[in-house]
Structure formats: C-alpha cells, structure tokens
Image (tube, rainbow, N blue to C red):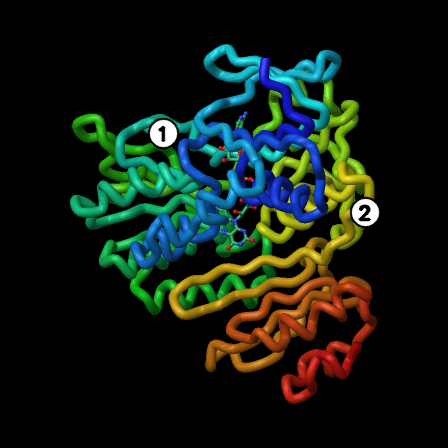
Amino acid sequence: MEQFDVLIVGAGHAGAQAAVALRQLNFPGSVALLTDEADWPYERPPLSKDYLAGDKSFETILLRPTEFWTSRAITLLRGLRVDLIDPVLRTVGTSGGLTIGYGVLIWAAGGAARRLSCTGHHLGGVHTIRTRADVDVLRGELASTRRVAVIGGGYIGLEAAAALSKLGCSVSVIEMQDRVLARVAGEPLSRFYEAEHRAHGVEILLQTAVDCIEERDGRACGVRLGDGSVLAADMVVVGIGIVPSVQPLLDAGAAGGNGVDVDEFCRTSLDSIYAIGDCAAHINRFAEGRRIRLESVQNAADQAGVAAKSIAGTPIVYDSVPWFWSNQYDLKLQTIGLSLGYDEVVVRGDVAARSFSVVYLREGRVIALDCVNATRDYVQGKALVASGALVAPALLGDAGRALKSLV
Ligand SMILES: Cc1cc2nc3c(=O)[nH]c(=O)nc-3n(C[C@H](O)[C@H](O)[C@H](O)COP(=O)(O)OP(=O)(O)OC[C@H]3O[C@@H](n4cnc5c(N)ncnc54)[C@H](O)[C@@H]3O)c2cc1C
C-alpha cells in the first residue's frame, strides 16, 4: 500500500496550492496530489472566458509547468477518484480498488457542476462548464452550433454568453429571477450587465422558468420555457451553481451538509483531515459570522496556505477579505468583500462611461465593492472593507474623492 505523509485529494486551485505551500514552507515529508481529472493542475476561471473563446491554449492555463511537480517531489496521481475514507486506519480507497495511506489528508475536491433534473437534461448538446474536458467537448460542437441557450444568469452563465456570442453564436440567457447576478450583486450591477449583454446582441430572459429540454434525434434542439413556448437552440449551457464534492468525507463521519465544516485552521471534525476551497464550509466574519462556502480562487489559495501552515507547524487562522473577478467583453469586474445583507447601495463613477463601482453598506459600514473597469477603487476599497469603515454615503458617491482618503 502506498503511503504519504500528506495526501491531497483534488488538484484544483486549492489542492495544488496546498502542495506548493507545503514545499515553500520546507515541509520535509512526502506529499501526493490526487485528482480524478486526466490533466495536470490548471486554472479554472479561463474555462468560461479566454479558453472557451479559444484565445488561450491549454498549456497557458496550467498552474505550473509539468516538470514543477517532480522537481518539488510532489507525487501527482491523475485519473483516480477517492470514494472511501477510513479515518481510523487513515486510508482512502480509490476507483480501481487502490488503497492509499495518509498521515494527514487535505480534502480539496471542490464541487461538481449542478445539473438540470428536468426531462432532457441528459441529451447531447447539453453542457456544463467545470472542467477542461467539459469545455473541449463543448468547443468540439461549436462548428455545428448557431443558437445557444444559457440557463442561469450568474457569473459563469454570463461569461459563457459573452464568449459564445463573440464566437458568432446567437445566445439567449434564461434566468429565473428578475435580474441577472441576483444572488451575488446589487441591482445597479445586474442592470448594467443586462444592458451590456443586450448591446452585444445577447437576449436576456428574466423571470423565466425552464420546463424541459426538447429533443430531436437524441440531441437538444430547444428549451421549453415555463409559459409553454420553445426557445430553439442547438446547444444548451447550464450554469446553475455547484454541488460540493464531500460525500466520502460525510460518509466517514465528518460534520457538514452543504460542504464539510471546518474551523479557522481549516480542520474538519475528523482527526488529521483538513478541507479547503470550494467544498469547505467555514465561519466567515465578512458574512456576518455565518458559515459559508466561498467559490473563488482567492479563497482556495488562502485556505490552502492556512492548512499548509498548520501542517508545517506554524499555524495561522483564516481571516482573508474575500475577492473575486469576472471578465465579460471588455469589462473587468473586481469585487472585494461580500455584499450579503447590505441595506444601502452607493454607485460611484460613470456607469455610462462603463467605469464605476457599486459600494455596499450595512448599518453604515462598508462591506463590499463591485468595481467595473475601476481597479483603483478595488485596490483602495479593500481597506474600507477590511476595517468595516463607517463612511457617509455622500462621500462614497463622490468619485472625485479617492477611497483611500476615507479609510
Ligand atoms: C468556469 C469557471 C469560471 C470561474 N471563474 C472564476 C473567476 O473568474 N474568479 C474566481 O475567483 N473564481 C472563479 N471560479 C471559481 C474557482 O475556479 C473555484 O473557486 C476554484 O477552482 C476552487 O478550487 P478548488 O480546488 O476548491 O476546487 P476545484 O478547482 O473544483 O478542484 C477540485 C478538484 O478535485 C477533483 N475531485 C473532486 N472529487 C474528487 C474525488 N473524490 N477524488 C479525486 N478528485 C476529486 C475535481 O475533479 C477537481 O479537479 C470559476 C469556476 C469555474 C468553473
């Protein structure tokens, strides 16, 4: 039986960074990075952006050159899926019947794209975007695709809509709520992005439910909407969130539900098992102290650092200001903080000139900013969010006043 001092399950942003961080901390033990994907660790954000649009090759989105992993004595085990964890014997069981022992286990398995459950969800031409393989299959069908229906007006759905319309497809976005990005952003940002997409020829259907996927010859040919009408489509892209990949951990007795619960050191309730990244449900002071999962590269990397430091014997607690970005067309959105529970919104800058920020306040304190083509606000706003600054809305709304002067 193979045995590693640290076994990391999942080689996405969190798992790969944990391995890197352990070596940067001069951790002397054996480290293995195990993934069910066939590829070397790669960046996920380009999958709905430049990689989908064909502007970046796969080689340019690798997290590290392939030789990096051997040069750092990190064993990469690809194409293996962990289905079973024995926290007493400290072993995992993988697809193919392999048993691997661990001293410490880092669970960094992320999540799987949530799929539709309606009739037709399994048809050819229905896609999700989570892995490189997903995008390669999708891109392989583009030559015979004219009309695309994107289900879900969140970041991934909107980024895919932007990339696919740029490639010449006629795109419709179907969103159940009354605005896009409703789960993550305030109304001014939603309305701005709706207008931008429409200006690029993308149809945005709001308050629109999906009844089923229509079939012709085993493939999707349209989406039947809640009102009975059918939106013709050669391809359907589903962007309705993820389901955290934690079942083996929960089966082994770890506390959790929506993800696996971790403490401020990213430790699960099971001895010597950490969880990091999209799958880790942690208490976050930027979310009013609620237990949440964050789906961002920042969170994956920062939690990886926290777990690695704890394992290397120099523990720190996780207390990062959340940040995120999204690229659509020539718009660079950068967000800082979490806008959960805001009670006031201030827009600063020039929406018409496509350079502005939306500032979110709760009880007078700045809790988050969404900055569109406004990197200075993003950089300077971080201190306001980190300190929960009390700032008069009129001052925040004055774009001539630098945010750093308000800290
Ligand atoms: C299309 C897309 C665009 C995005 N854009 C942005 C963006 O612009 N900015 C941003 O901050 N974030 C973005 N994100 C989110 C970001 O990519 C994730 O938050 C990040 O990848 C999380 O890293 P992770 O390591 O926790 O999970 P993942 O990256 O999902 O990695 C988990 C890995 O574990 C593997 N795995 C799962 N279960 C098992 C198992 N049982 N055994 C073995 N291996 C397993 C998975 O296949 C996967 O390879 C985007 C995500 C997607 C999908």
Dot 1 or dot 2, earlier in sequence: 1
Label total for image: 2
Which residue is located at x 46 percent, y 29 percent?
78
Residue 403 position within the rendered picture, expressed as x and y whole percent measured from the top left: 71, 79
The circle on residue 121 is: 1
Residue kind at label 1, given as amino acid type: His
Which residue is located at x 82 percent, y 40 percent?
313
Name the residue at the bottom extreme: 400
Q: Residues within 10 Å of mark 2 (few under 14, many from 20)?
A: some
Residue 193 position within the rendered picture, expressed as x and y whole percent measured from the top left: 46, 64
One can see residue 207 in this view: no
Q: Are dots 1 and 2 in contact, CB under 8 Å? A: no
The circle on residue 317 is: 2
141 in relation to 75, above or below: below
146 in relation to 331, above or below: above
One can see residue 329 in this view: yes
In this rendered view, identify the residue nearer to me: 28 or 40: 28
In this rendered view, identify the residue nearer to me: 47 or 363: 47
The kind of secondary structure element at disc 2 is: loop
Quadrant in which the N terminus is drawn: top right
Nearest to the eye among marks 1 and 2: give it. Answer: 2
Residue 192 position within the rendered picture, expressed as x and y whole percent measured from the top left: 48, 68
